[in-house]
Image: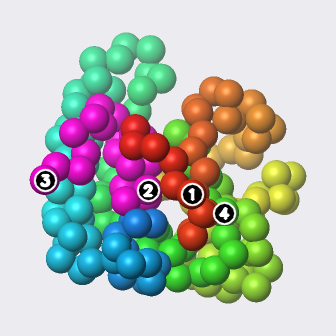
Amino acid sequence: MTYFTNCTTLDQLKAEYRRLCLIYHPDTGSDTANTATMAAINAEHDRVFEQLKAEHNRKAAQDTTGRTRPTTETPAEFRDIVAALLKLDGLTVELCGSWLWIGGDTRTHKDALKAAGCSWAPKKQLWSWHHKEDGSPFFRGKRSMAEIRYKYGSQTFTAGADLPAVI
């Protein structure tokens, strides 16, 4: 069985992985949770991630404008943050591009979110997580969440809620 056949970008892969985790991850407590299935999903995720990462880095090398940058992200980073967020009840996680935006009942999980590498964005009133590239300039974006959603697309996940359709 293949889980990520329709994923052609790292962002699509991340969205589908998050969706599958909400269904099959043992920490969700759902009837469909299965460690063997999750192990197969993780193995396929790693393989597809490396393929899509190599393609992304090839495109970045060919981009003369400098808008596409190569990535050093590993599949384990995203898997670890998703697993950490699944253990926290009452959160809503939104995937916009390669960033996770976390809302909902975050106050009770403040320490766990910090430990997972998330940062508080006071103007957006949300927590965020993204892979931090070495040598990448850091600046605080002035875009609203509506602008971010419009530019990068958005997929929201809430544990226990109806799950979005497959990408």
Q: Tell me which label, 2 or 1, sits earlier in the chain.
A: 2
**Where is residue 116 shown, x and y percent of the image?**
54, 76
Q: Amino acid at mark 3?
A: Met
The reply to whether residue 55 is in sight is yes
Q: Tell me which label, 3 or 4, sits earlier in the chain.
A: 3
Q: Amino acid at mark 2?
A: Arg
Q: Which residues are magenta?
A: 1-20
- SS type, badge 2: helix
Residue 2 within the segment the image draws in magenta: yes
The residue at the point 66 percent across, 63 percent down is 92
**Label 2 neighbour load within 10 Å: few <14, some 14-19, many 20+:** many
Q: Tell me which label, 1 or 3, sits earlier in the chain.
A: 3
**What label does residue 1 carry, if any?**
3
**Label 1 neighbour load within 10 Å: few <14, some 14-19, many 20+:** few
Q: Which residue is mark 2?
A: 19
Q: Which quarter of the picture shows residue 161? A: bottom right
Q: Amino acid at mark 4?
A: Thr
Q: Nearer the viewer, residue 103 or 115?
A: 103
Q: How many marks?
A: 4
**What label does residue 162 carry, if any?**
1
Residue farthest to the front?
Answer: 31
The residue at the point 31 percent across, 66 percent down is 76
Please report contact status of discs 4 and 1: CB closer than 8 Å, yes or no. Answer: no
Q: CA distance from mark 2 to mark 4?
A: 13 Å
- SS type, badge 3: loop
Q: Which residue is mark 4?
A: 92
